[in-house]
Image (cartoon, coloured by chain):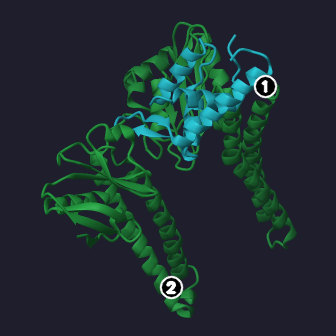
Chain colours: A cyan, B green
């Protein structure tokens, strides 16, 4: 069964994960689908909205916009947010006695 | 030794500014610093070689651009300047952001022109020249302002024509464009369409005010596709749906509402396999309709429920709320018509009936759009 992905923060985190390497919106969606074993496949509109919002907040930046599709990557702020999130999830795992 | 040069109002014609930088580099003057507010350039003497310059929006040159032979010569909070050793190199990134910025400025001037010109016409015609006689300096300044706005509009229009030559054609319909349906959606000639309509192979439906309840329209088109009537195209106004007889298929039909639909938005959706069916040419908010055929799993344009709710809220606020306000205005108007002592009762009655009908129409559309928002909110209320 597909993950409902009704919680915006999930999408934001997946997008941050995917943008460790420069990617287009479609590439982001494909990466997330692959990384979650097909359980999560964000729609084009959701990815576009999230990317626009994160760009405004300087979490991600344009890597290349020479062609029609803009390529994005993480900024330093984005990297630190991703790092912080990874630590938080790892702590949560430890707290619950799960292997990280 | 640093040399200062002035380039006032450079942002009015960015191509001319870039050409000036190229000319300076050919004379051996290389840009080291720039002040965008007053247009002061700081230059240093160097090799006499023409360089290709680009002044772009953004706080730094993208890394991808730097990897392709461009280098950043200056970066500020809103703009950066990049240079390339080959003076004939393609202008990248293109001038789309400047075109958008110019279009906004043009709209501001258009608004000023409408207000001032309207005032001038009103003052001349409506008040038998009373305003003209009472406040001549005010009237003159309004005339001057409207003339300046008109000249500015023409100027920005020509600059945008110049910028458009450098911009790549996306072959998609961006915000503010006049086209509403992509050309490739018309697979039949008008004569063939007429024939098909006559023979019953094509049907059309015009649900009244479907923009106000897009979820109903989505459901209708998907149901028709399942019954063997595949959606073919819209009419240019987007009010009529054309369907053609086909094998039953699974079709996802999505009506999106964007405050500002950028080229990036269109590319992202097209890359994901969505077919553009319609885009409204409204500048403040656009309806964009997408479709996608599928086999097993129904694709979602918005997989995140918060995005779907936001879209419904936008539709309700921009489409529904003004309608409700117009309806309230109609009620107030009817009340005024009857409260104020009228000389002709039948004329007042006629006006009241007219406004009652208009008020009913507005309120139906307004309630429809607001109802759409609450329906969507209710649908996702159990999802955390």
Label 2 sits on residue: B139
Q: Chain of mark 2?
A: B
Residue B353 image-quadrant placement: bottom right
Can you tell which mark lies on residue B150? none
| Residue B77 percent coordinates (x, y) | 46, 57
Q: Is residue B316 above or below residue B156?
A: above
Residue B218 visible in the current orientation: yes
Q: Earlier in the sequence, mark 2 or mark 1?
A: 2
Residue B224 image-quadrant placement: top right
Label 2: element kind = helix
CA distance for labels 2 and 1 = 60 Å
Q: Residue at x 74, y 44 (%)?
A: B366
Nearest the viewer among B371 and B171 is: B171
Task: Judge from the rendering whether residue B97 lies leftward or rightward of residue B20; answer left or right.
Answer: right
Q: Chain of mark 1?
A: B
| Residue B330 percent coordinates (x, y) | 77, 57
Q: Label 1: few (<14), some or many (≥20) within 10 Å?
A: few
Q: Label 2: few (<14), some or many (≥20) within 10 Å?
A: some
Nearest the viewer among B110 and B377 is: B377
Q: Residue at x 48, y 21 (%)?
A: B273
Residue B315 image-quadrant placement: top right
Q: Are marks 2 and 1 in contact (CB under 8 Å)?
A: no
Q: Residue furthest right?
A: B339
Q: How many marks?
A: 2
Tell me the quadrant of the picture where the N terminus of chain B can be found: bottom left
Label 1: element kind = loop
| Residue B297 percent coordinates (x, y) | 61, 11
Can you tell which mark lies on residue B383? 1
Residue B180 visible in the current orientation: no
């Amino acid at each position: 069964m597909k993950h409902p992905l009704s919680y915006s923060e999930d999408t934001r985190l997946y997008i941050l994960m995917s943008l460790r390497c420069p990617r287009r919106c479609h590439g982001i969606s494909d990466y997330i689908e692959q990384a979650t074993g097909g359980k999560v496949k964000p729609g084009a509109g959701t990815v576009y909205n999230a990317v626009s919002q994160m760009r405004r907040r300087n979490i991600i930046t344009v890597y290349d916009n020479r062609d029609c599709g803009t390529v994005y990557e993480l900024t330093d702020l984005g990297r630190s947010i991703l790092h912080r999130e990874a630590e938080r999830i790892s702590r949560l795992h430890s707290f619950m006695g799960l292997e990280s | 030794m640093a040399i200062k040069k002035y380039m006032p109002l450079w942002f009015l014609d960015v191509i001319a500014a870039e050409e000036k930088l190229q000319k300076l580099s050919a004379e051996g003057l290389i840009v080291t610093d720039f002040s965008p507010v007053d247009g002061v350039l700081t230059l240093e003497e160097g090799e006499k070689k023409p360089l290709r310059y680009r002044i772009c929006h953004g706080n730094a040159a993208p890394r991808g651009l730097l990897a392709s032979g461009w280098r950043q010569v200056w970066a500020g909070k809103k703009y950066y300047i990049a240079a390339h050793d080959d003076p004939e190199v393609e202008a990248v990134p293109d001038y789309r952001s400047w075109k958008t910025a110019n279009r906004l400025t043009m709209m501001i001037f258009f608004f000023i022109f409408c207000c001032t010109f309207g005032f001038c016409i009103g003052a001349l015609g409506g008040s038998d020249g009373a305003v003209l006689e009472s406040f001549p300096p005010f009237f003159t300044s309004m005339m001057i302002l409207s003339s300046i706005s008109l000249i500015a509009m023409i100027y920005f229009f020509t600059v945008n024509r110049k910028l458009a030559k450098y911009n790549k054609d996306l072959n998609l319909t961006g915000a503010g464009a006049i086209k509403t349906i992509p050309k490739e959606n018309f697979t039949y000639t008008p004569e063939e369409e007429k024939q098909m309509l006559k023979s019953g192979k094509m049907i059309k439906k015009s649900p009244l005010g479907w923009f106000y309840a897009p979820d109903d329209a989505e459901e209708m088109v998907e149901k028709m596709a399942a019954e063997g009537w595949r959606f073919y195209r819209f009419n240019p106004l987007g009010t009529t749906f054309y369907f053609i007889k086909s094998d039953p298929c699974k079709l996802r039909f999505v009506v999106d509402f964007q405050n500002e639909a950028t080229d990036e938005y269109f590319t992202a959706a097209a890359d994901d396999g969505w077919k553009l069916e319609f885009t409204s040419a409204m500048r403040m908010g656009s309806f964009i309709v997408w479709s996608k055929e599928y086999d097993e799993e129904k694709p979602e344009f918005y997989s995140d429920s918060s995005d779907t709710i936001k879209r419904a809220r936008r539709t309700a606020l921009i489409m529904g709320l003004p309608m409700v306000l117009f309806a309230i205005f109609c009620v107030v108007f009817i009340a005024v018509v009857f409260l104020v002592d009228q000389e002709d009762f039948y004329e007042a009655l006629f006006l009241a009936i007219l406004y009652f009908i208009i008020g009913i129409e507005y309120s139906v559309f307004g309630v429809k759009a607001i109802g759409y928002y609450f329906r969507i909110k209710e649908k996702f209320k159990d999802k955390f």
